[in-house]
C-alpha cells in the first residue's frame, strides 16, 4: 500500500502538470487559429468588397442598357423592318447578358434570378409587341407598340431588378 502511495506522489503531480500545460497550449493554439481566420477574412473582404461593388455597378449598367426605351433608341435605325429590329433588340439583350454572366458570383441568388427574369421579361415584351404586327411592318410601328406597352406597365422588369439590386447593395455596404 505504501508503494502505491509513493508512486502516486510522483505520478499525480506529473499528470496535473501535463494536463495544465496541455490546456494552456490548446487554448493558445485555438486563439491563434481564430486570429488567423479573422485576418484571412479581413484580407478576403479587402479583395471581395471592390469586386462586389464592381458587380453591382456592372449589373446596374446592364439593366439600364436593356431597358426598353434605352435599347430601342440605341438600336433602331431608319428603314429597319419590325422583324429585323426585333432580332437586333433580342440579340443585343442576350449579348449584354452573356457579357455580364460572371457577375453572378458576387451577388445573391435572389438578385441574380431577378436580373434574369428582367432580361426574359424584356425579351418577352419585345416578342409580344412584334407578334401583334404583320410580317411587313416597319421598325417604327414596333417602336410605337413598345412605347405603348412601356407606358401601360406599372413597373418595367428592369426597374424591378434595379430596385432589388440597389436594395442588396445597400444591405451589403
Image (spheres, rainbow, N blue to C red):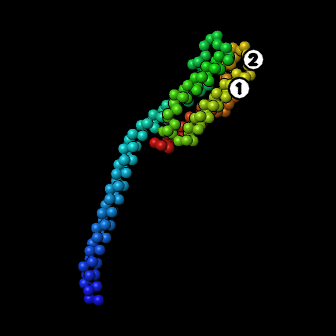
In the image, 22: left or right of 130?
left
Indicate the position of residue 24 as horizontal and vertical percent values.
Answer: 30, 65
In the image, 149: left or right of 45?
right
Mark 1 vs mark 2, CA separation in Å: 12 Å
Q: Confirm whether residue 156 shows in the render.
A: no
50 lies above or below 31: above
Question: For residue 11, which numbered disc appears in the image?
Answer: none
Q: How many numbered circles does the render carry? A: 2
Indicate the position of residue 48 as horizontal and vertical percent values.
Answer: 42, 40
Residue sticking out furthest to the top: 79
Q: Which residue is mark 1?
A: 128
Residue drawn at (55%, 41%), measured in percent from left and top? 109
Residue drawn at (50%, 34%), measured in percent from left and top? 103
Indicate the position of residue 99 as horizontal and vertical percent values.
Answer: 51, 28
In the image, 40: left or right of 113?
left
**Front residue of this view, candidates 25 and 122:** 25
Q: Residues within 10 Å of mark 1 (few under 14, many from 20)?
A: some
Question: For numbered disc 1, what is the local secondary structure?
Answer: helix
Q: Earlier in the sequence, mark 1 or mark 2?
A: 1
Indicate the position of residue 139 as horizontal and vertical percent values.
Answer: 66, 15
Tell me, yes or no, whether the two marked residues, 1 and 2, touch with CB atoms within 8 Å: no
Residue drawn at (59%, 37%), measured in percent from left and top? 114
In the image, 15: left or right of 69?
left
Q: Residues within 10 Å of mark 2 (few under 14, many from 20)?
A: few
Q: Which residue is mark 2?
A: 134
Classify residue 146 by image quadrant. top right
**Front residue of this view, candidates 151 and 121:** 121
**On the rendered image, what quadrant is the N terminus found in?**
bottom left
Amino acid at each position: 500500500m505504501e508503494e502505491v502511495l509513493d508512486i502516486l506522489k510522483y505520478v499525480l503531480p506529473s499528470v496535473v502538470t501535463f494536463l495544465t500545460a496541455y490546456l494552456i497550449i490548446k487554448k493558445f493554439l485555438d486563439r491563434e487559429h481564430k486570429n488567423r481566420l479573422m485576418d484571412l477574412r479581413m484580407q478576403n473582404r479587402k479583395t471581395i468588397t471592390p469586386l462586389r461593388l464592381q458587380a453591382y455597378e456592372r449589373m446596374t449598367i446592364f439593366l439600364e442598357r436593356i431597358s426598353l426605351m434605352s435599347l430601342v433608341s440605341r438600336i433602331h435605325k431608319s428603314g429597319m423592318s419590325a422583324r429585323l429590329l426585333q432580332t437586333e433588340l433580342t440579340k443585343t439583350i442576350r449579348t449584354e447578358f452573356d457579357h455580364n454572366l460572371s457577375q453572378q458570383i458576387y451577388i445573391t441568388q435572389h438578385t441574380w434570378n431577378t436580373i434574369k427574369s428582367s432580361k426574359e421579361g424584356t425579351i418577352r415584351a419585345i416578342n409580344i409587341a412584334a407578334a401583334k404586327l404583320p410580317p411587313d411592318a416597319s421598325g417604327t410601328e414596333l417602336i410605337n407598340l413598345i412605347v405603348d406597352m412601356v407606358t401601360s406597365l406599372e413597373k418595367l422588369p428592369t426597374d424591378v431588378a434595379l430596385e432589388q439590386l440597389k436594395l442588396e447593395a445597400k444591405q451589403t455596404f
